Amino acid sequence: MLLKAGADPNCKKDGVWTPLCTSIRDNRSDIFHLLLNNGADPNLSSAEFPAFKCVTHNRLQYLQPLVDAGAKLSQPKGILETAVQFNNVDAVKWLIAAGVNPNDRVPVTGATALTTAIKNDNVDLLNLLLASGADPNGRGEDWPIIVAVKHPQMLKRLLPCIAEPRAFKGIMEMAVVANQLESIKMLLAAGVSVEDRNGGVFSPLTTAIRERHKEIVYYLLDEGGADPNSPGEHLPIIKALRRMEGHDTEILGLLLERGADPNKVYRGHNAIIQALENGDDHILKFIVDRCVVDVEAKDELGHTVAEIANTRGSETTWDILNGSS
């Protein structure tokens, strides 16, 4: 009666809710078709666009009538990503069959159906999307392989589709940040360098030490071939001294055993200078017992180890340094 009396089928309640989207939400087929037949706009947004509402509320039976009435499935982009987000497999299949581009990006976030499938650890949808033309090298909110380092199962499926994993600089360090040893192993096997730096600065080894991922530190040194003297933002041994909890010398000792040089200076610091700055004679002795100290090594201000010991140390400190031989 309202429609016959001239009511607008596109009039919004509270400036938001459209009759068409509400009929989809409530699964009122009779009202849905009545509205479409009386001029309801299939592209008019409510809280969601009508086609998106069909996906989020699993009302796939209304998609084709909307399309027949002029609904544009790619305006705005992102309906396929929404279907993946809601794990609506039938909607994903329908939309792909209807010609929706599997590489469309959500306008605000940049996410694609593929990157969302990876984030959600949905290997079935990942397989479906790849088989349907989704680009494994196409950027979403980030590159798919970058998103996948947090999800080893997804990385395992994605890696064979990536022509050159080494092109994604910093990916190894990102896997370390994510604390994903299995991803690290796969990346190494794919040819990514164990020294691959994020931003050209942060190395996998120094990041593993910073994040206290001990298992990864061992793996990088013993299996990955990481250089214990290769700096990231700092030398690995400096990072170990700065991130040490109490007198837990496990990582410090490991680095020394694997060839870290306590006398090597980088950015004005070496292990001896750092131990002196920390004022910890216990740790200083731990290092000195395992090396010959270069008392002429200089910090960034040109002060030698001997001069720093004179200003910061105690008699005990000098006894420790003099014990180096």
Image: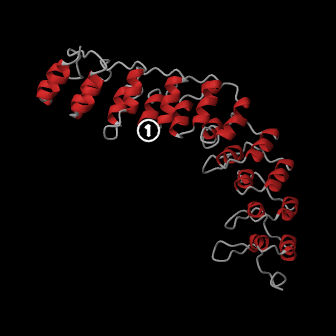
Quadrant of the rendered structure where residue 66 is? Answer: bottom right
Residue 42 to residue 226: above or below: below
Residue 3 to residue 223: above or below: below
Q: Is residue 225 left or right of residue 110?
A: left
Q: Looking at the picture, how far across and down is residue 98, in whole percent? A: 86, 50
**Identity of the amino acid at label 1?**
Arg
Q: Is residue 123 left or right of residue 253?
A: right
Quadrant of the rendered structure where residue 158 is? Answer: top right
Which residue is located at x 37 percent, y 29 percent? Answer: 252
Q: Looking at the picture, how far across and down is residue 136, in whole percent? A: 71, 35
Q: Residues within 10 Å of mark 1 (few under 14, many from 20)?
A: some
Which residue is located at x 50 percent, y 38 percent? Answer: 177
Name the residue nearer the viewer: 95 or 154. Answer: 154
Q: Where is the N terminus found, in terms of image quarters?
A: bottom right
Q: Is residue 290 left or right of residue 91?
A: left
Query: Dot 1 lies on which element?
Result: loop
Q: Looking at the picture, how far across and down is residue 217, in whole percent? A: 48, 31
Asked whether residue 199 appears in the rendered view, the answer is no
Asked whether residue 24 appears in the rendered view, the answer is yes
Name the residue nearer the viewer: 130 or 230. Answer: 230
Quadrant of the rendered structure where residue 261 is? Answer: top left
Which residue is located at x 86 percent, y 75 percent? Answer: 34
Name the residue nearer the viewer: 308 or 22. Answer: 308
Name the residue nearer the viewer: 13 or 177. Answer: 177
Q: Looking at the picture, how far across and down is residue 52, in whole percent? A: 74, 60
The residue to which callout 1 is attached is 212
Q: Where is the C terminus found, in terms of image quarters?
A: top left
